[in-house]
Image: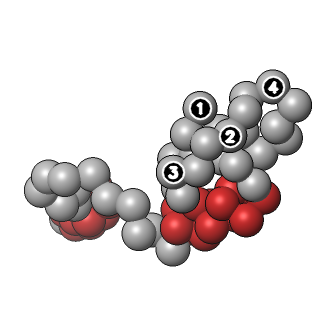
């Protein structure tokens, strides 16, 4: 199989870092996720902001 990060050939069986070829590639990939550098193409989602805004509107309605 091919390491998804460095494209080097690697084995599945007996490889504790699979699907990566080494611990270095595994940790590098994890760091990319942690830094939020992987993106799925498409419009930005603003779900959190929308939920907060609707909650604020509900609070104002309840207090009047």
8 lies above or below 25? above
> Which of the two discs, 1 and 2, labels the residue nearer the N terminus?
1
Task: Report how far apart the C-alphas of labels 2 and 3 lie in the structure.
Answer: 9 Å
Q: Which mark is residue 13?
A: 4
> Which of the two discs, 3 and 1, labels the residue nearer the N terminus?
1
Q: Quadrant of residue 28?
A: bottom right
Task: Report how far apart the C-alphas of labels 3 and 4 lie in the structure.
Answer: 18 Å
Query: Decide: marks 3, 1 in contact (CB < 8 A)?
Result: no
Q: Which element is circle 1 on?
A: loop
Query: Decide: marks 1, 2 in contact (CB < 8 A)?
Result: yes
Foreground pick, 11 / 33: 11
Task: Report how far apart the C-alphas of labels 4 and 2 lie in the structure.
Answer: 9 Å
Task: Report how far apart the C-alphas of labels 4 and 1 lie in the structure.
Answer: 10 Å
Q: Which mark is residue 1?
A: 1
Foreground pick, 58 / 44: 44
Give left or right: position of 61 versus 51. Answer: left
The C terminus lies in which quarter of the figure?
bottom left
Q: Position of residue 30 (x, y in %)?
A: 62, 61
- Tell me if mark 1 has few (under 14), some (14-19) or many (20+) residues whose alpha carbon lies within 10 angstroms of its own: few
Residue 28 seen from this side: yes
Give left or right: position of 43 versus 5. Answer: left
Residue furthest top as drawn: 13
Which residue was labeled with disc 3?
Answer: 7
Q: Which mark is residue 10?
A: 2
Residue furthest left as drawn: 43
> Which of the two discs, 4 and 1, labels the residue nearer the N terminus?
1
Q: Which element is circle 3 on?
A: loop
39 lies above or below 8? below
Q: Which mark is residue 48?
A: none
Q: Position of residue 4 (x, y in %)?
A: 51, 47
- Tell me if mark 4 has few (under 14), some (14-19) or many (20+) residues whose alpha carbon lies within 10 angstroms of its own: few
């Amino acid at each position: 199989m091919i390491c998804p990060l460095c494209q080097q050939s690697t084995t599945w069986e007996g490889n504790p870092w699979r699907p990566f070829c080494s611990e270095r590639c595994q940790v590098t990939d994890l760091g990319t996720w942690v830094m939020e550098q992987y993106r799925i193409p498409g419009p930005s989602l603003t779900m959190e902001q929308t939920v907060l805004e609707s909650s604020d509107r509900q609070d104002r309605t309840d207090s009047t």
